[in-house]
Image (cartoon, grey):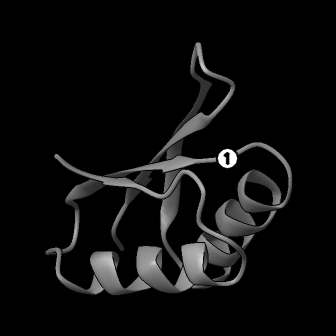
Amino acid sequence: MDTLDLRGEVCPYNFVKTKLALEELETGQILEVILDAGEPIQNVPRSVKDDGHKIIEVKKLPDGAFSLKIEKS
């Protein structure tokens, strides 16, 4: 599983970088994205779903960031 740490990244760059990382994967592969609270964790999952991918897990991390696991469709 690939991991993309986007803590400190501002919208919309966190979605753009997530989308580019997903393009590198094969269908069915999992990408873990680490996102800040607030706009990133609100917007990125919605945009990823709009692109047809599947959100497998959203988990809050001890530092307040979120781990978002995405399955490429």
Residue 69 at what x, y percent from top left?
A: 43, 45
Residue 53 at what x, y percent from top left?
A: 48, 70
Image vertical order of residue 69 relative to residue 54, above or below:
above
Q: Nearer the viewer, residue 20 or 71?
A: 20
Residue, far front? 8
Q: Is residue 22 left or right of residue 8?
A: left
Which image quadrant for residue 72?
bottom left
Q: Is residue 43 left or right of residue 45?
A: right
Residue 62 at what x, y percent from top left?
A: 59, 13
User: Dot 1, how many residues are within 10 Å of its Cα: few (below 14), some (14-19), or many (20+)?
Assistant: many
Q: Nearer the viewer, residue 51 or 19?
A: 19
Q: Is residue 70 left or right of residue 8?
A: left
Q: Is residue 62 left or right of residue 54?
A: right
Image vertical order of residue 10 relative to residue 30, above or below:
below
Q: Amino acid at mark 1?
A: Asp
Q: Nearer the viewer, residue 62 or 51?
A: 62
Residue identified by numbered label 1:
36
Q: Residue at point 68% right, 72% down?
A: 10
Image vertical order of residue 13 relative to residue 5, above or below:
below
Instruction: Classify mark 1: helix, strand or loop.
Output: loop
Q: Residue at point 67% right, 46% down?
A: 36
Q: Residue at point 36% right, 74% down?
A: 73
Q: Nearer the viewer, residue 52 or 16?
A: 16
Which image quadrant for residue 48?
bottom right
* Count of all numbered marks drawn on residues in the image: 1
Residue, far top? 62
Image vertical order of residue 43 relative to residue 67, above or below:
below
Residue 24 at what x, y percent from top left?
A: 17, 82
Q: Residue at point 43% right, 55% down?
A: 70
